[in-house]
Image (cartoon, rainbow, N blue to C red):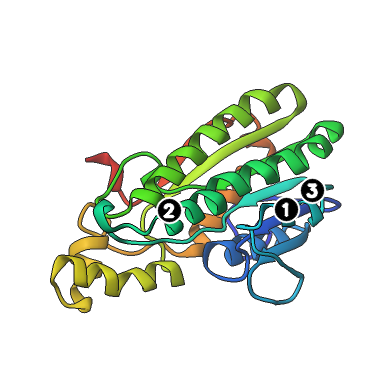
Amino acid sequence: MTTGHVVDLDLTGKTALVTGGGSGIGQACARRLAAAGAEVVIVDLDPGEHTIVADLSDLASIDGLPATVDVLVNNAGLQVVSPIATFPDDRFALIQRVMVEAPYRLIKHVLPHMTDRGWGRIVNISSVHGLIASPFKSAYVTAKHGLEGLSKVTALEGAPHGVTSNCICPAFVRTPLVDRQIADQAQLHGIPEAEVVEKILLARAAVKRLIEPAEVAELMAYLCTPPASLITGSSITIDGGWTAH
C-alpha cells in the first residue's frame, strides 16, 4: 500500500487524463493517480508540469487531446452565483459547454481505447448540486444534473467492455472555486464574508467542516481499484451529511 493512502491502487502502465488538474480537486486527483503509477496528463487553462493548456469551452480543442486514456477524470468547472432573472446568458451557455458538452466529447474521445483494452474508469466530479438544488446557481445545478445523466448512460454502454462510469458528489470542498464564491454569497445574503462558510456553505452539513481535495481524490482512487469493478452508474456523495436532510 502506498504510504499515506488508504486505498491500495496500482495503475502502472496506464494513462490518466484529468481536466482542471492545475488546482483544487483536479490537482489532488492528478497527484493521487501519479502516486498509483499512472502516467498523468493534466488539461488546464493555466500552464504547469505535465499540463496541456486547453480551453474546454472550445470543444474543437478536445480533438487534439490524447485518446489512449485508461482513466478519465472530468473535473473542470466554473461557478456563477446570480438569480435567474439577472443571470448572464453567455455565462449559462459557457458553463454547459465546459461542464456537460466537454465531458461528453472527452468520453466519446477516449471510450474506443477503453473498450479495445477491455478496461476503463471514468470518474465525473459532480456535486451535491447534481442531486439537489440551491438558489442562485441555475447554470451550475443544470450542468451537474446533466453530467449525472451522461455518466449513467456511459455506464450502461461501457459495462459490456469493462468500463465503469461514476459520479462523485461532494458538498463544499476547500478549493479556489469555493473561495471565490464567498464574496458573492455574502452580497446575495447580506452577511459578512466571515459568516458565509458557517451560515451558508455548511448550513446543511452534519459534519461542520469543508471537505479536503485529497479526500475526494481518495474516493476517486477507490473507484479505480478491482473491488470497485461493480460500482458503475452510481452517484457517490461525500458531503458530511449534506444530502441526508
Secondary structure of residue under mark 2: helix
Q: Is residue 57 visible?
A: yes
| Residue found at the very far left of the displayed protein | 190
Q: Which badge, 1 or 2, comes first in the chain's sequence?
A: 1
Distance between the alpha carbons at the discs numbered 1 and 2: 19 Å
Q: In this rendering, is residue 152 above or below 137?
A: above
Residue 49 vs residue 55, the one in the foreground: 55
Three-letter residue code for mark 1:
Ala
Q: Confirm or deny contact between disc 3 and disc 1 (CB under 8 A).
A: no
Image coordinates of residue 242 in percent, x first then y, are 29, 48
Three-letter residue code for mark 3:
Val
The crowding category of the residue bearing disc 1, from other C-alpha atoms within 10 Å (few below 14, some 14 to 19, many at least 20), is: few
Q: Is residue 1 visible?
A: no
Q: In this rendering, is residue 25 above or below 124?
A: below
Image coordinates of residue 11 in percent, x first then y, are 77, 51
Picture disc at residue 60:
1
Image coordinates of residue 19 in percent, x first then y, are 64, 58
Picture disc at residue 69:
3
Q: Quadrant of the C terminus?
A: top left
The crowding category of the residue bearing disc 2, from other C-alpha atoms within 10 Å (few below 14, some 14 to 19, many at least 20), is: some
Q: Which badge, 2 or 3, comes first in the chain's sequence?
A: 3
Identified at 85% across, 35% down, the residue is: 117
Picture disc at residue 92:
2
Secondary structure of residue under mark 3: loop
Q: Which badge, 3 or 1, comes first in the chain's sequence?
A: 1
Distance between the alpha carbons at the discs numbered 3 and 1: 18 Å
Identified at 35% across, 64% down, the residue is: 210
Identified at 78% across, 57% down, the residue is: 38
